[in-house]
Amino acid sequence: MASRLPLRPPWGWAWCPAPLCPPGCPPSRGLCGAHLPAALLRTRPFVGGQWMPADQALTFDLAQARATFPVLSPGTGAHLARVSDCGAAEARAAVTAAWQARPAWHRASAQERSRLLRRWFDLMIQNKDDLAKIITAENGKPLKEAHGEVLYAAQFLEWFSEEARRIYGDIISTPAQNRRNLVLKQPVGVAAIITPWNFPSAMITRKVGAALAAGCTVVVKPAEDTPLSALALAELASQAGIPAGVFNVIPCSRPKAKEVGEALCTHPLVAKISFTGSTATGKILLRYAADSVKKVSMELGGLAPFIVFDSADVDQAVAGALAAKFRNSGQTCVCPNHFLVQKGIHDAFVGKLSGAMKAQLRVGSGFDEATTQGPLINEKAVEKVEKHVRDALSKGATLVTGGKRHESGGNFYEPTVLSDVSTDMLCSREETFGPLAPVIKFDTEEEALAIANAADVGLAGYFYSQDPAQIWRVAEQLEVGMVGVNEGLLSAVECPFGGVKQSGLGREGSKYGLDEYLEVKYVCYGGL
Ligand code: NAD
């Protein structure tokens, strides 16, 4: 069948490369929906260990569960799959399932929880190619990056399978002879977890690994753009033997997100809300949490500064800038939003950065091996980049490279550098979340810190300097949760991820990540 089509249609897109592509299979810049890895392709909610609506014992509205929404390829707009569009009823059914599974999961030994998380990790690694294809299909990121995400995501399960066995309480020196004072760490309870599309797999395992290790059970509402990765994880959790009801996934469309979010985050049986996404949505969920005083973790938006001081090694700074800025086409919350470059090194940095971008960045299908820059997630995301570029140019910025939609059309945008950028431009004040590198020239360290710290968010910050005293000063004074010093890639499962100011509350990954799912209980044992 595939032979009926030329390898590349006239406009340069590849047809679906599956060997037996059926007639009507759309040009797709990669796998079409019909050829997503069938073994992991699931489209229904996973609740109480069942793919709803298979379990008749669960009470939910069948008609609603049959409603579906399309998952689109960001590269072509092609339909990849139709997924159940859950509503409040499914959200409540999932919370009930998680609540029922909670006592047994809590009582299971730490070793047992650890073993099951480890098995889940092993299955992710065994299925890494299929998981990566699903990520590339629904998110658009290049397959190589998708593989990186799968490994990163799996490592959270591995890390927390190890941490599950290292949850310690305390014994406190007694203030009275006839008493002993103890501290127990206990699971918080049912956690509602709401995740974004930019890391469809890792943002789930970073939360769920910690929650399950601590003895909590969870309901995950994945982003509407990328539910297939979440459902594939549910299939592997089931194969790993994670007990029914411990890990539940309820996908829904954007129009249903409010209803599902509200049902989860106001439910009396939910004790914890963990969210990654925009600051605006985080504030809505915080209001829900306030009414019933739920514990919260919020990983919200950033406005990461990338500062290059005169003392920096310019080639090292350019390499770090490329790695930090253009991963996932600029759609990570720790991507530098703007570059602050000291006047002595400014011209060299801008020249070398734009040269490196032209030499190293390739826009195209995530399934093409040469591609480094996939499409943005949707039209709205492209429009935001366009708006920021237009605004900057109208206020006096200079276009160094890029500056428009890529010739492929659709959601593809050219990697772009603007110089002569000032702090009143939108691209300096709002998160662009796309492949735009605006450069602001500065004179002094104080000036750079003042610009960087003016933001009301503070997730990541980067700076390049070879001056040890300056390195300490700036690392301590940057108002962010994570600092990259002469380094553009800072995430690691062993290290705490999170922000200050309006970038969020709490930390994920690392030894601190478990605390978000544990209560500290003081026991005063008297009458001795
Ligand atoms: P978003 O807030 O629009 O969506 C995130 C999730 O929230 C999705 O699942 C969405 O369906 C859901 N949602 C939206 N409105 C809701 C509502 N009213 N009630 C309940 N759920 C609702 O954000 P996005 O566009 O998916 O992601 C981009 C943003 O996320 C950026 O600002 C980025 O910085 C941030 N982000 C932060 C981190 C981090 O770790 N700090 C990581 C990734 C993304």
Image (cartoon, rainbow, N blue to C red):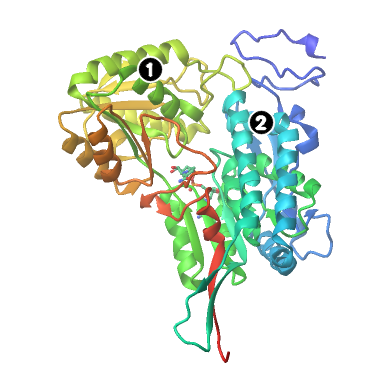
- Can I make out residue 251 in this image? no
Amino acid at pointer 1: Gly
Amino acid at pointer 2: Ala
Residue beneath label 1, please? 402
Q: Residue at x 34, y 23 (%)?
A: 317
**Location of residue 116 in the rendering, given as x and y in whole percent from the top left corner:** 74, 51
Quadrant (top left/top right/bottom left/bottom right) for the N terminus? top right
Front: mark 2 or 1: 2
Q: Residue at x 70, y 55 (%)?
A: 247
Is 354 on the left or on the right of 148, as rendered? Answer: left
Would you identify the image quadrant in which residue 304 lies? top left
Question: Front-most of 261 and 85?
Answer: 261
Would you identify the image quadrant in which residue 158 lies? top right
Q: Residue at x 30, y 46 (%)?
A: 479
Crowd class of label 1 (few under 14; some 14 to 19; many from 20; radius 10 Å)? some
Indicate which disc residue 277 carries. none
Question: Front-most of 405 and 99?
Answer: 99
Q: CA separation, marks 2 and 1? A: 29 Å
Residue beneath label 2, please? 132
**Location of residue 391 in the rendering, given as x and y in whole percent from the top left corner:** 28, 30
Q: Is residue 488 above or below residue 195?
A: above
Numbered disc total:
2
Pointer 2 with pointer 1, Cβ within 8 A: no
